[in-house]
Image (spheres, grey):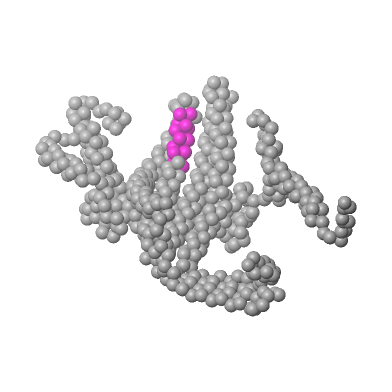
Amino acid sequence: MSRPARNLSSPQPVMTMNRARTFRTPLTAGLMALGAGLLLTSCVNVDEEVSRRPSELWKAPVEALPGQDVVVPGPRPSSASKQLGVKPIDLPTALDIALENNPETRSSWYQAKAAAASYGQSQSSYYPTVTLSGSVGREYSHNYLVQGSTQNATVYGPSLTMNWLLFDFGKRSATADSARESLYAANFGYNQTYQDIVQQVVVAYYNLGTAMASLQATQASLENAQATYEAAKTKLDTGLGNKQDMLRSLADVKSVEAQLEGDYANIEQARAQLAASIGVKVGEYLQIEPPSAPPSFAEIDEGVSGLVALALQQRPDILQSYAQTRSAEYDLQAAQADLWPELSAQAQGSYQRAIDRPNNPMEYAQAALVLEWDIFQGFNKKYTIEQARSTLRSQQQDLINQKLQVVSNVWTYYFAFRSAIKQVEARKEAVTAQQQAYDAISIGYETGINSLLDLLTAQQDLDIARQALVDAESTLANSVANLANAIGSLPQPAQGIEQRFAQQPVSEEQQEEQAVDGLFRDSDPDPKPLAPQWMQEDEDDKDAENNSAAASATTKLEPHDTQGNERAQWHDDGRDQGVHQAGQTDQDSQQIVEDREGENAADGQLPPSADVE
């Protein structure tokens, strides 16, 4: 039997399949190799991205470093900044420069603007959302039941979708209210930053003035030390002194010179702090006019009770905490409203056109009211409500703690301020007395009445008195700035604070009005007791005991009783007004001294004045 001849024109499916497989195998292998290469190159070698060992520094690549032109920007051009380097600036000019250049105020201002944008974003839920889109695609369809139904077409066309939330049980309104309160909090935070910058500039300005005053005091001490050295050297040259006194006075001169160098360093440190607070580069061009008086503020005449009430009403960080608490309340309301369904209106329409397909074009439109209710989300909403409630309670406790801290700060700074006034007065009198003593002992040393030790001691006492006066004036200026910041006010230049409050008479009506009786004023937003009730009862018991003791007293007061009453008078005045009425106490002390002198004179003995004191 002969085999049939092969029809060479007939298709050979096996060979076609092999060719296709042969064609696809290199392509697949290439794609797999390309994918593997991309995968390997995308991996990070951790050993190459860090230092080679823990004992070596990491060498940063060039792209991780800033540019070559790394400079500190200069002050922004303004009428105040133009005075820098031209003439010494005063405190108002320094404040103007700081408010224009300090980056903290601008950062806080931008944060407030971001909060305003968030508030505007929360209003968007009251408007419908409209989405316009367009598409171009390739479609393939085939019906296996119908022979020859395979179709390929290119489809394109636009579509429009609209969604409008109509009702959500108050969720979007609570969200918008929360954003509004957050905006208030950001603005109050900006005001607090503004006041903090002013307080920092005032403190830095007066610290630089204090450093300059300390330098002047040291220079005066150096002149005295040099005069003492010249006097000791003159005595040695004339044969009236000895070398030990001359060397001792020379050592005193060198000691003051060393202190002088320390004062120069303190000036530059204070200058750097002032430059940082006003937001400019430090340099010798930054010169100030020495302050002649401590700062002041508008409410400086108020008593401590009034200042506490003002702080709770106007201090920006307290108002910020109030706003944050209200924002947390609205967040809780929004979380609770999220439990309920939402009603919205939806509409959509589209227009499609296909190439090489019959029945073209196609239009589609739909509108509906949609009620959407998330029935179960794995208790997500339950925990969201609990989180919002806990956040609110935490914010409420923070507000209470902040109130207590503000009251404590106002109380502390107030009595520090009133004490600093008395300290400045006393230090001025001490400097006058020490200067007179030094002049007298200096004359006595030249005439041989006093020794060099007496002169050096008087000189050191005068130096200490001068420096103590400088420190007291610095403490007064800082206490005024701190007190103004504590009550939410702005310090400002003033004149004659010591004269305004020195020996200020206080009537009984004023003492009763300004006394801390355990209650805030009616205008306080949070009228709660300032002091526990038991403290008021203890004060009443003490007053009753003092009255009974005064009624039963029949003998004159002893010196230690006089001092005790003086301290008691200081405590009472500090509690009510903060002014120490020392006039009556001095009269009582003088009467006691005269009585003792009379008794001692009758016995034929008159003790020295130091013993009487």
In the rendered image, residue 158 lying in the magenta stretch gets the answer no
Q: Residue at position x 89%, y 52% from top?
A: 2
At x 51%, y 75%, the residue is 366
In the image, residue 266 above or below residue 279: above
| Residue 188 visible from this viewpoint | no
Residue range (magenta): 455-470
25 w.r.t. 93: above or below: above
x then y, percent, for residue 536? 20, 45
Q: Who is closer to the viewer here, 530 or 502?
A: 530
Residue 137: image x %, image y %?
67, 67
**Left or right, 312 with reference to 64:** left
The residue depicted at 61 percent of the width and 77 percent of the height is 362
Query: Which secondary structure type mostly characterizes the magenta part of the structure?
Result: helix
Vertical order, 606 against 345 (above or below): above
| Residue at the front extreme, as displayed | 1
Residue 400 seen by the camera:
yes
Is residue 612 shown left or right of residue 412?
Answer: left
The vertical placement of 562 against 145, above or below, is above
The quarter holding residue 246 reads top right
Q: Nearer the viewer, residue 480 or 185?
A: 185
Tell me residue 61's x, y (percent): 71, 42
Which quadrant of the figure has residue 340? bottom left
